[in-house]
Image (spheres, rainbow, N blue to C red):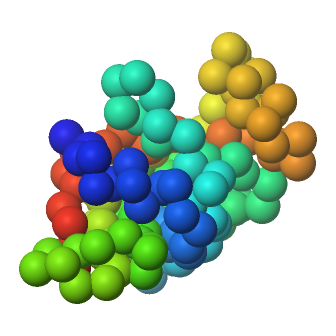
Amino acid sequence: MLTEKFYDVLKHEGVVSIISWGTAEPHVVNTWNSYLVVTADERILIPAYGMRKTEKNINQNNKVKMALGSKEVLGYKDYQGTGFAIEGTAKYLESGSEFDMMKEKFSFLTRVLEITVTSAQQKI
């Protein structure tokens, strides 16, 4: 589901916006492209230090949306820059082998946000 172009975007720095919603208005939190780790089965792992409102929302509704991109990767029609809209379900990991692997890479994390991708669309 995740294309080569998506992986190219992750090789360049850019802002990632993660949107969650419980029973209230949507909430947006940001991180960086370089913090995303994609597993062999295409789940996205993200180190979390804060993200408490996101966690509260996910406990009520596990659906999330995410937007990311880079101006360094050619998009459609060879225009400079491309981006993706991702949809999926999320949960937090607080232990286990993937948590340990992420903690080794990102010592600041307290939890790992795991997103199981259900849709990935290139937007530009």
Residue at the spot x=37%, y=70% of the render? Answer: 73
Residue 63 visible in the displayed image: no
Residue 54 in the figure: left or right of residue 42: right
Question: Of residues 111 and 43, which is closer to you in this image?
Answer: 43
Can you say which quadrant of the picture contains the C terminus? bottom left
Residue at the spot x=66%, y=40% of the render? Answer: 112
Residue 71 visible in the displayed image: yes
- Residue that sits furthest to the front in the current view: 78
Residue 88 in the figure: left or right of residue 51: left
Can you say which quadrant of the picture contains the N terminus? top left
- Residue that sits furthest to the right in the current view: 107
Q: Give the image location of residue 37, x and y in percent.
A: 55, 40
- Residue that sits furthest to the top in the current view: 97
Residue at the spot x=78%, y=36% of the render? Answer: 105
Please determine whether, in this image, residue 11 is positioned above or below residue 13: above
Q: Give the image location of residue 31, x and y in percent.
A: 63, 66
Please determine whether, in this image, residue 65 is positioned above or below residue 14: above
Residue at the spot x=88%, y=48% of the render? Answer: 108
Q: Give the image location of residue 114, x and y in percent.
A: 52, 39
Please determine whether, in this image, residue 123 is positioned above or below residue 54: below
